[in-house]
Amino acid sequence: MKKTASSSSLGPGGLDIAQAFFKPIKDTAPPSLNKRQTKISVVGVGNVGMAIAQTILTQGLADELALVDIDPNKLRGEMLDLQHAAAFLPRTSILASADYSVTADSDLCIVTAGARQNPGESRLGLLQRNVALFSKIVPPLARYSPETILLIVSNPVDVLTYVAWKLSGFPSNRVIGSGTNLDSSRFRFLIADHLDVNAQDVQAYIVGEHGDSSVALWSSISVGGVPVLSFLEREQITYEKATLEQIHKQVVDGAYEVISLKGYTCWAIGYSVASLARAILRDQRRIHPVSVLAKGLYGIDAGDVFLSLPAQLGRSGVMGVTNVHLTEEEATRLRHSAATLHELQSQLGV
């Protein structure tokens, strides 16, 4: 984005104010070529995209943030609104354009853009429109940033992550869906609330589809390192399976409730995606339940299908999938979730 005259560093008579303002020190060396800036691009400046952008800025995760959208007025307005907060944020260069060249050399490209469902439209019809939209988004991202990692947030996230993988031609470790990372956060919150503990002390995963066929891994839940179900059995504390199912139902219905109350979700997904960006760009190698290519894992043989599994994330993207022990019931439900997704994506002809 070109600088306007008001933002130029040139003062009266062509004086470079930046150089005049600071006195140089002796025996300086040029900046190291090994040091480079971190760049994140966000495609789509709706409620979700801007919540993600805002969270990335406040957490100082990028040196440069590029925004892309088809609405030039809203795009420029959002860019200016964020730039005007510069005095309160970590130093970040914020760019915006409808041209995908603004995303060039991104370390991470986050896609939130998606078509909204029309009244009476089928899920397949909506998905086909989103595939058409992705065919205009993903190829230019891959062209301008051939080494980037794609992080898909648009829904239905699992199938669209598969579509992005196909359209980009990237290796599977560099195409990730936000998946059930947020679902698992809701799950941890509900368990923590039930037990009156801090959610950060709860380890619990929702896996499979980000949707109705998701699977709660009750057998591997632990609080402060203590496996919950085995503890209850050892102490002969009775619990009803219906109670567990009700908690899972609250997880699945959580987004619908927020949407019915305020019209959309944004803040939780903003924090969720920022946590994934941090794990990737800072090579933290943390484990997050995200949508990955699951073929051959946990007995999934439904073809090339993306769904959420606990995956280790680092600078190369997905570094591996955790070998979590599943009960036979959990494994069966996970394979059913994979089959559900594969059946849906097989109708797309991608």
Image: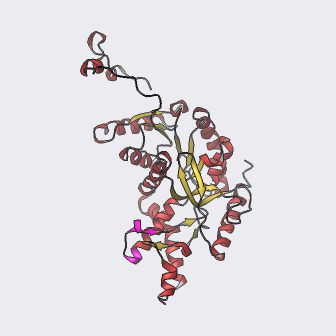
Residue at position x 68%, y 72% in the image = 332
- Residue 137's image quarter? top right
Query: Per the image, is 278 magenta?
Result: no
Query: Per the image, is 199 magenta?
Result: yes
Rendering coords of residue 100 (x, y %):
55, 33
Quick check: 251 above or below 241? Answer: above
Rendering coords of residue 28 (x, y %):
34, 22
The rendered magenta stretch, by its main secondary structure, is classed as helix
Which quadrant: the N terminus?
top left
Q: Is residue 177 left or right of residue 350?
A: left
Compare residues 79 and 257 and report the one nearer the observer.
79
Task: Write down the region rendered in magenta.
Answer: 193-202
- Residue 345's image quarter? bottom right
Quick check: 193 above or below 170? Answer: below
Please indicate, yes or no, whether residue 239 appears anywhere in the rendered image: no
The residue sitting at the top extreme is 13
Compare residues 142 and 201 and report the one nearer the observer.
201
Q: Is residue 342 left or right of residue 117?
A: right
